[in-house]
Structures are given as C-alpha cells and as structure tokens.
Amino acid sequence: MKRFLIFFAFSLVFVACNSGGTETGSSPATETEDEQKEERPVKEENIQEEVTLRVSTLGETMTEMKYEPNRLEVPAGAEVTIILENKASSEAMIHNWVLIEAGQQGEVTQMALDAGADKDYIPDTPKIVAATGLADPGETEEMTFIAPERKGTYQFICTYPGHTSMKGVFLVK
C-alpha cells in the first residue's frame, strides 16, 4: 500500500508539471499576455503634435497696447504656428512677437535696439527661441517653430522700440 501511495503521489506531481502546456511549451497565461499586447494600440514616439495659436495686438496708444491672450501653453517639442494679428490702426503700433528665455527681456530689448529696423529689431542671439517679423497696423505675420523640449516658463515680448510693456507668458508642458 505504501508503494501505491508513493507511486500515486509521484504520478500527480508528474501530471501537474506537464499539464497546461502547449506544443510550443508556452503556458495559456503567456498566450493571453501576447494576445493582449497585440490588441493594444502602439504609441508612435515620433509623432509631433501641431499647435496653431492666434495672438492679437490690441491698443492704439503706448499705455493701451497689449497681447491678447497674454498666456499661451504648448506641449514640449510641438510644432507651433503663431499667427500674429495687429488689430491696431495707429501708425505707431508696429509689433512683433518674440519668444525668449524667461528673465531675459531687458538684455534682449537692448540687443533689439542695436539690431535696428533693418533686422526688424530681432537680434541674433540664442536667448530668442522664435520671432515673427514686424506687423504694421492691420497686418498679420505668421511663423512656425518647434517648441523647446525643456518644459518650463518662457516669455514673449515685442522688441519694437518703446514697446517693453507688451509681454506674455509662454508655458511649455
């Protein structure tokens, strides 16, 4: 009887170790996981998000001029198109849209004066991420750039002389 019990126990262990397998040796749980992987959508890493933002310049005097909106958000690395609409009618209200590293407005503004009208008051400096040309009253300027990969807060300003009050916040998320 003792031999029978040992043989029976050994048979159970043998059957348990070999049951549930398939011809390829994978378990049903593995097949289920593989099937689930096939059903999940594959996220493509190289898809670049495209964002179009409309920014208006408002105001007819130096004390009224401003950007609307003055806060913009984009995903890091997105392809961003800025459409700058100068809605002013006063000849003095010439504007551009210049994206800079936060805290660099004073230095970039001085460099813009040095660059002059021939360069649309856009200096050649790595402190500028992107910039439109100058838009006369009633005109629209458009430009496309790639948002920084580094998430954080940037600024946008108007570098036309005397327009230092025109600024906004550009968040890269």
Image: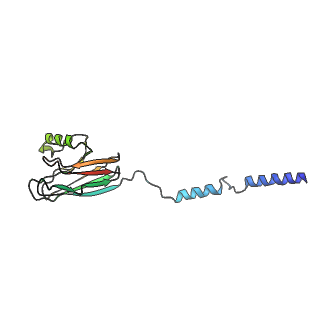
Q: Residue furthest left?
A: 91
- Taking the image as shown, residue 10 lies to the left or right of residue 100, namely right
Location of residue 113 in the rendering, given as x and y in whole percent from the top left corner:
14, 42
- Taking the image as shown, residue 83 lies to the left or right of residue 46, namely left
Q: Which residue corresponds to the image point at 55% horizontal and 58% vertical from the top-left?
A: 36
Residue 127 position by quadrant? top left
- Taking the image as shown, residue 80 lies to the left or right of residue 1, namely left
How many numbered tags mark residues here? 0
- The image's colouring method is rainbow
Q: Residue furthest front?
A: 63
Location of residue 55 in the rendering, given as x and y in whole percent from the top left corner:
22, 57
Location of residue 97 in the rendering, given as x and y in whole percent from the top left corner:
21, 51
Q: Residue furthest right?
A: 1
Task: Pick the residue in front: 63 or 140.
Answer: 63
Q: Which residue corresponds to the image point at 27% horizontal and 51% vertical from the top-left?
A: 169
The answer to whether residue 44 is above or below residue 105 is below
Location of residue 87 in the rendering, given as x and y in whole percent from the top left corner:
15, 59
| Quarter the N terminus occupies | bottom right
Residue 100 position by quadrant? top left
Task: Pick the residue in front: 56 or 164.
Answer: 164
Task: Pick the residue in front: 44 or 160.
Answer: 160
